[in-house]
Image (cartoon, rainbow, N blue to C red):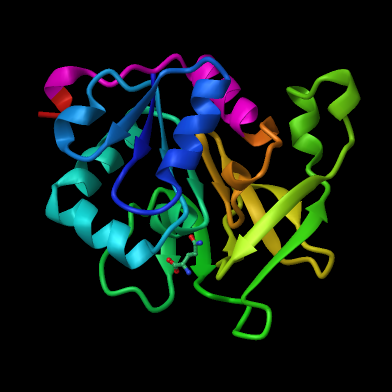
């Protein structure tokens, strides 16, 4: 069972993709919803709203602890902001589990939102034969960029100018764009493979 942090943003879209892939999706709104999770997705949306509400409900501490215990987590857009070790212009602490620095709303007003084809070779590990080598259509909406990457972090995708937009640090995955907003399920399948490999289950007592 994979959780989707359900405070605001692309919650329904992620749940829809998970269910389409035959995976049980659990919307996470309060601490008790974390029990039994094998992984968690933090969706795109507004990082300040998601983060403030998650703090208020005591979810940040619990999620941080579960990730430290080995729970796979994937943050898309606002989600990668909340995972990052450091972020500019944010007035509350992030989860701080992903060793990157993130710059919010990094593209400026002129190019606020855009779509672009990106090569993501790592996805070939889970791709069907006809998908292999095919670029990912990446949707950026007031997106952040990852402008500093720690040594233990793998870069999965870059924009043509070299800007880092997808990373992985072991069981932690981050994308500055929104794979849930396209029909391409490769990123979800890639995350589900991580979940399978990690074989983690959140204990009920750890989360209430
Ligand atoms: N601009 C948003 C933020 O800073 C992120 C954008 C998104 O998730 N679509 O939280």
Residue 188 % position (x, y):
59, 31
Is 189 colored magenta in this rendering?
Answer: yes
Q: Is residue 202 above or below residue 174?
A: above
Q: Quadrant of residue 179?
A: top right
Image point 69% across, 37% down: which residue? 183
Image point 81% across, 38% down: which residue? 121
Residue 100 % position (x, y):
52, 59
Residue 22 % position (x, y):
53, 15
Question: Visible in this render: residue 153?
Answer: no
- For the N terminus, the quadrant is top left
Give the magenta part as a residue range.
188-205
Q: Is residue 63 left or right of residue 102?
A: left
Q: Is residue 140 left or right of residue 102?
A: right
Image point 59% across, 21% down: which residue? 193
Q: Is residue 136 above or below residue 106?
A: above
Q: Is residue 155 left or right of residue 8?
A: right
Q: How many circles with numbers are drawn on the protein?
A: 0
Q: Is residue 95 above or below residue 164?
A: above
Q: Is residue 112 above or below residue 202?
A: below
């Amino acid at each position: 069972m994979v959780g989707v942090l359900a405070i605001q943003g692309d919650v329904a879209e992620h749940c829809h993709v998970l269910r389409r892939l035959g995976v049980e999706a659990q919307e996470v709104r309060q601490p008790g919803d974390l029990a039994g999770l094998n992984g968690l997705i933090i969706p795109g949306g507004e990082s300040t709203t998601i983060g403030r509400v998650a703090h208020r409900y005591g979810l940040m501490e619990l999620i941080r602890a579960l990730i430290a215990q080995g729970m796979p987590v994937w943050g898309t857009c606002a989600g990668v902001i909340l995972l990052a070790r450091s972020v500019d212009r944010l007035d509350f602490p992030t989860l701080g589990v992903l060793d990157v620095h993130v710059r919010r709303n990094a593209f400026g007003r002129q190019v606020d939102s855009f779509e672009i084809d990106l090569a993501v070779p790592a996805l070939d590990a889970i791709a069907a034969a006809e998908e292999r080598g095919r670029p990912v259509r990446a949707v950026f909406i007031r997106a952040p960029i990852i402008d500093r990457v720690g040594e233990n972090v793998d870069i999965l995708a870059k924009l043509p100018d070299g800007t880092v937009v997808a990373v992985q640090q072991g069981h932690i995955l981050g994308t500055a764009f929104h794979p849930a907003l396209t029909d391409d399920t490769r990123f979800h399948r890639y995350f589900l493979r991580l979940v399978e490999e990690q074989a983690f289950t959140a204990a009920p007592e750890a989360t209430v």
